[in-house]
Amino acid sequence: MTQSTDIEFNSQQASLAQVLPGLKKAQLRIVFSYLFHLIKVDEFRASFVGTQGLQIKRKIDSSGYILRDCKLYAWAYHRAIRCGDPIPKFKDFGVTKEDAAFLRTLNLVTIPKKYLAYTQKQMEDTLSFITASDMESYIGKFAYRKHKFLVDSFGYSFEDIIQRLRGAALYAAYRQYPFFNPKTPGHVIAVAKIAVRNSGQNLIQENTTQSRQRLDTDNKAMYETFGDADTIQNHPELNSLSEPDTFMNESMQALAKLEHKMTPRAKRFLLIMSGQHDAEFSTYLGRDNSTAAERMEFEQYSKKVRKFFSTSGRSVEKLFSRIRAIAGWQH
């Protein structure tokens, strides 16, 4: 019953004009400024009339041609120019000649050239973790733990849910590019896992409101219990993930974009807070910290991390205030 979020990587040859018909070049520049994290989503939406921005974003989100082919070629070209490397061939990226000419006019000078340019094969190899056994196990366990009630009472299948979560992980990884740090490949995995949790939480929220009610009359009382904001804390599968995932998402963005300005201690703190495995901290906890980050309440886990680093909650907030200021994020 879920709408697939898989990106159509095996579709026939596309073009920007086919995926986003009717857009002027100035609007296409806005699209790629958003895709390369040069503008925020609010600025992206404000650049279009009415619901046009949302409609365009939906097309982008399902387009492998844009997220993979065009982004990979654009960054490969612009980085090669700045680094004095051989100019990549647009045909190697599956990009049309017309689109390649447009992508070469983008302004990506604010993206540090330390971020490597990937070929399609390198990207495929990098993201192979999404279909590896560890990630498949993670997604499967998350789906069974959080969404069983959707299967039992809302008519979903675990296969549909897992497909959605897998697609969300893949999409998030492609959206993160080119901000991949080869020294800490766990960044991309963490981004993908955060996307899985956020997509799973969104699915719960979509189906526990009156406007999305799928329960029959006999199950009305059960629905009202699940949908009641006053009793939602009584159902673990409905607990909000927004606080920890917002924190973790900001951690990953900070590490990707600002790690060159951070001390090793700050980088390690953010990695551990985001649930990345750390042998010493795992020994301190008495179990793998990456598992603990998933199972423990966020506040409990964060207290353990703060105690391990001998730091206070106020110091952590001060760190993130500085990160937000440097990155230009809004509170």
Image (cartoon, rainbow, N blue to C red):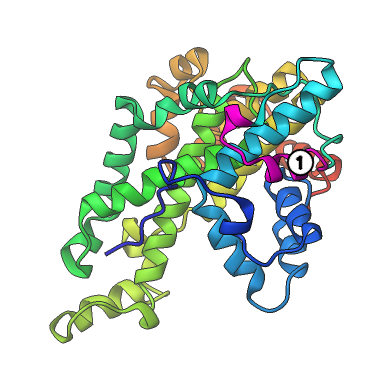
Q: Position of residue 80 (x, y in %)?
A: 78, 21
User: What residue is shown at x 78% (from left), y 46% (from top)?
Assistant: 38
Q: Is residue 177 above or below residue 223?
A: above
Q: Quadrant of residue 43?
A: bottom right
Q: Position of residue 55 (x, y in %)?
A: 58, 68
Q: Nearer the viewer, residue 256 or 168?
A: 168
Q: Nearer the viewer, residue 272 or 205?
A: 205
Q: Is residue 233 above or below residue 192?
A: below
Q: Position of residue 218 (x, y in %)?
A: 13, 83
Q: Position of residue 124 (x, y in %)?
A: 47, 26
Looking at the magenta stretch, what is its main secondary structure? helix
The residue type indicated by label 1 comes to Ala
Q: Is residue 23 above or below residue 70?
A: below
In what element is the residue under mark 1? helix
Q: Which residues are magenta?
A: 91-106
Q: Nearer the viewer, residue 65 or 146?
A: 65
Tell me if I can see residue 248 in this picture. Answer: no
Farthest front residue? 97
Q: Quadrant of residue 141?
A: top left
137 left or right of 174 in image = left
